[in-house]
Amino acid sequence: MKFRKSAALLAAAFTVAGLTACGSDSDAPSGDSASSSTGIKGAVIGFAQVGSESGWRSANTDSIKAAAAKYGVDLKFTSAEGDQTKQIASIKTFITQGVDVIAFSPVVETGYDAVLQEAKAAGIPVILTDRAVDADPSLYKTFIGSDFIKEGEKAATWAKTEFANDAAVNMVVLEGTTGSAPANDRKTGWDNVLGKETKFKTLASQTGEFTRDGGKKVMEGFLAKYPNINLVYAHNDDMGLGAIEAIEAAGKVPGKDIKIVTIDAVKAGMEALAAGKINYIVECSPLLGDQLFDAASSVLAGKDIPARIITEEGEFNQAQAKAALPDRKY
Ligand code: GYE
């Protein structure tokens, strides 16, 4: 709490002294957002993470912890292990502790209204990272993360071209965590492009909980039931990697007998793509740490920030994965 008041005073002082005061810090990285993060040193920030379900999540956690260390933030980090009740309990603890900012990546989209109201009543600003919530937008300052609908559209656009000369495509879907924003939106995005294309037939669609093991088990069930699968749409790389194991165990060749498109572009996914076992990956960047603390810094300085901060990302075929792998950070 103390930090918020002093940060606001500091911001006021900078305004009076003019912009050169900010520019005089020779250690500050260049660019507006980076220089604003220098004002967050010592702030107490509570971060309630989803869990540790995937390679993406590990990279996201690393990014947040590294950025906190870089900016001198006092980070209180908790992991809900995929349990919304546990995540809400830790947000409540942050409120009781009187942290300066609360950030979290919601496990699912709904059910956070009451705790967001509590944070607002306590005067603690909330920043959402990675996943959206279905709640009144005035209850949080911003949502930093990817456009998951666009990701689903990119995956489907690839499939449309890849199977352009096929009369029929038998698809199975490995869905992310039921009720989570990326699972909901990656389905919507896919349907936006291919929902009306009758030649794409969804044989089955089931959650693999965004985990490798979940993807493997669900795919084993699909393979046992459907002998004629042509395409797997996995909502993340980890489930696609699990599907590869199941396909190989069933004596089929992933990437050839059964094509696979996934989302994330974590290193293990990119390696499978480079090896031809996955056919296409849409990128979803987990490196949100710097953006989070830039936004928190602005909020604490009393500045307005955009209600939505969208992450830039690409997409990869096999050749592009091979070229990108040596420099891949996660
Ligand atoms: O795609 C998946 C992770 O919310 C964008 O969660 C994130 C998703 C990511 O478990 O791998």
Image (cartoon, rainbow, N blue to C red):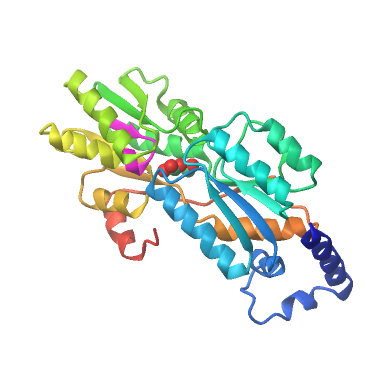
Q: Quadrant of the C terminus?
A: bottom left
Query: What residue span does the magenta drawing correspond to?
Result: 232-239
Q: Residue at x 36, y 24 (%)?
A: 206
Q: Looking at the image, which is closer to me, 174 or 90?
A: 90
The answer to whether any part of residue 324 appears in the image is: yes
* x, y percent for residue 102: 67, 49
The answer to whether any part of residue 126 appears in the image is: no
Q: Quadrant of residue 240?
A: top left
Query: Count of labels shown?
Result: 0
Q: Quadrant of ligand 1?
A: top left
* x, y percent for residue 212: 31, 40
Membership of 51 in magenta stretch: no
* x, y percent for residue 251: 10, 33
Q: Looking at the image, which is closer to me, 294 or 87?
A: 87
- Specify whether 235 is left or right of 25: left
- Specify whether 156 is left or right of 117: left
- Specify whether 171 is left or right of 65: left
